[in-house]
Image (cartoon, rainbow, N blue to C red):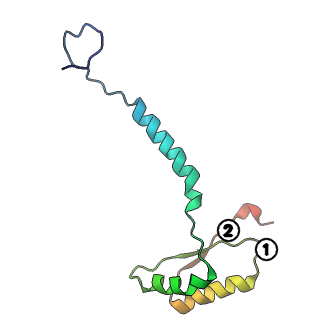
Amino acid sequence: MSFGGFDDNRGQPMAEINTTPLVDVMLVLLVIFIITAPLFNQVIPFADLARRFAEAAAHSRQPELHLRADRNTRYEAIARIMAAAQQAGVVRIAFVTDPASVH
């Protein structure tokens, strides 16, 4: 059974694959991932922080802690988080900043 069109191929199957639907689906998925990617940040309550740091430090592959704080966050809160991470054994700590907002 051939899925050719109404042309004069005399029973020859259509040799071209229509990739337009595939491209459309891939572009829609790309847009969805671009929109949802910033939502993948994890927020951990302070009560669970020490336990989560200890669990992360126990893994053979050390995780990297990314600290992103609001400009109005007190340094004391950041220092407590860094101290808890160091006490648990997490050594890879990075600060995430937005250079456009620093003036």
Whether 28 is drawn above or below 10: the answer is below
**Label 2 sits on what residue type?**
Thr
Crowd class of label 1 (few under 14; some 14 to 19; many from 20; radius 10 Å): few
Residue at 76% in and 71% down: 71
Asked whether residue 91 is in view, the answer is no
Residue tagged 2:
97
Whether 58 is drawn above or below 20: the answer is below
Q: How many angstroms separate mark 2 from mark 1 (CA)?
A: 13 Å
Q: Please indicate whether residue 97 sits to the left or right of residue 19 in the image.
A: right
Q: Which residue lies furthest to the top in this view?
A: 8
Q: Looking at the image, do the residues carrying marks 2 and 1 touch, with CB atoms under 8 Å apart?
A: no
Q: Which residue lies furthest to the bottom in this view?
A: 87
The earlier-in-sequence mark between 2 and 1 is 1
User: Camera-side residue: 48 or 4?
Assistant: 48
The label number, if any, that marks residue 49 in the structure image: none
**Label 1 sits on what residue type?**
Asn
User: Camera-side residue: 33 or 67?
Assistant: 33
Residue 43 on image: x %, y %: 60, 72
Q: What element carries label 1?
A: loop
Q: How many labels does the image show?
A: 2
Residue at 25% in and 23% down: 15
Location of the C terminus by quadrant is bottom right
Residue 45 on image: x %, y %: 61, 78
Residue tagged 1:
72
Residue 96 on image: x %, y %: 64, 70
Residue at 55% in and 62% down: 40
Please identify the quarter of the rendering in which residue 98 is found. bottom right
Location of the N terminus by quadrant is top left
